Image: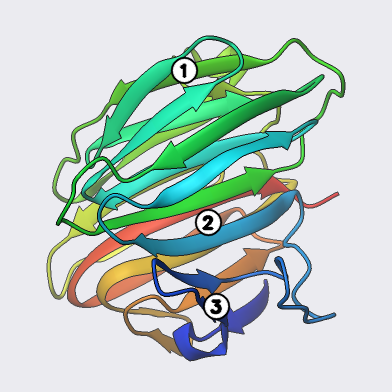
């Protein structure tokens, strides 16, 4: 089993006043040659957006984009004609494909928005752009699949053999994540709590990339909320 540990405080940081952003991988003005991507996972941004603020209309192409609000809500509008609000407890996917424009902002005047925005390289280029979102409910002591490949049957599917799963686990539990594909790796972001994987302790917003294994055993040190991003490694 190969591992790479990324502590929360090792992430890139950009504070624009209205936007406080933490970057797990090189993004915008933050560049770290050792933190470009993990397999097909290119971006994991942890953004806090002030009330009434957001990202103006901008383009994307040939990327699978996943948005997971952790607190608050986000107003999305795009060139496909979608105008939607995505709230905590919902997940949004967008296949940029041949090219789209979109804008995103916090519709609340006084409540902060905290979200993960995730970019995954697609396994097909120049596809027709696509949008989907759905609600999910986390069950205690189990991972819930939020995103999967097209054959998964999940409405929020993407053009890649990748899976995003989230779960809540109680203190002192021992759990296992079994990879969907033995050639994939898993990037585990600890949203809340404390866990141990092998000899590595993870605290809030620490992350670890794991490859060359079929199963990841996790010891819950303090009630935890965990995001697993399983992706092909090449």
Q: Which residue corresponds to mark 1?
A: 132
Residue 26 percent location from the top left of the image: 73, 70
Dot 3 or dot 1, earlier in sequence: 3
Which of pointers 3 and 2 indicates the residue nearer the eye?
3
Residue 209 image-quadrant placement: bottom right
Q: Where residue 92 sits: x, y (%)?
A: 43, 30
Label 2 crowd (10 A; few <14 / some 14-19 / many >=20)? some
Whether residue 172 is visible here, answered yes or no, is: yes
Return the residue nearer the eye: 174 or 191: 191
Q: Residue 160 at x, y = what percent?
A: 70, 30
Q: Secondary structure at mark 2?
A: strand
Disc 2: which residue: 215
The image position of residue 53, as x and y in percent, is 36, 52
Closer-to-camera residue (73/175): 73
> Disc 3 to disc 2, how far (Cα)?
35 Å
How far apart, in angstroms, are the residues tagged by discs 3 and 1?
29 Å
Give the distance between the C-alpha atoms of the residues marked 2 and 1, in whole angstroms. 30 Å
Q: Is residue 64 left or right of residue 112?
A: right
């Amino acid at each position: 089993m190969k591992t790479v540990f990324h502590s929360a405080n090792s992430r890139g940081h950009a504070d624009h006043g209205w936007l406080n952003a933490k970057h797990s991988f090189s993004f915008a003005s933050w560049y770290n040659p050792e933190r470009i991507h993990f397999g097909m996972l290119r971006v994991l941004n942890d953004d806090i957006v002030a009330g009434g603020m957001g990202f103006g209309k901008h383009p994307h192409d040939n990327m699978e984009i996943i948005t997971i609000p952790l607190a608050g809500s986000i107003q999305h509008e795009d060139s496909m004609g979608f105008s939607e609000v995505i709230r905590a407890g919902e997940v949004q996917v967008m296949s940029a494909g041949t090219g789209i424009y979109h804008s995103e902002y916090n519709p609340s005047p006084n409540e902060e928005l905290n979200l993960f925005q995730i970019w995954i390289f697609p396994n097909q280029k120049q596809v027709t752009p696509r949008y989907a979102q759905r609600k999910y409910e986390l069950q205690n002591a189990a991972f819930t699949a939020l995103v999967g490949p097209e054959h998964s049957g999940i409405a929020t599917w993407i053009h890649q053999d990748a899976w995003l799963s989230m779960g809540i686990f109680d203190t002192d539990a021992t759990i296992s994540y079994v990879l969907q594909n033995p050639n994939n790796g898993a990037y585990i972001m600890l949203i809340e709590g404390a866990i141990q994987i092998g000899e590595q302790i993870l605290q809030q917003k620490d992350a670890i990339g794991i490859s060359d294994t079929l199963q990841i055993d996790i010891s819950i040190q303090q009630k935890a909320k965990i995001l697993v991003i399983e992706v092909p490694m090449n």
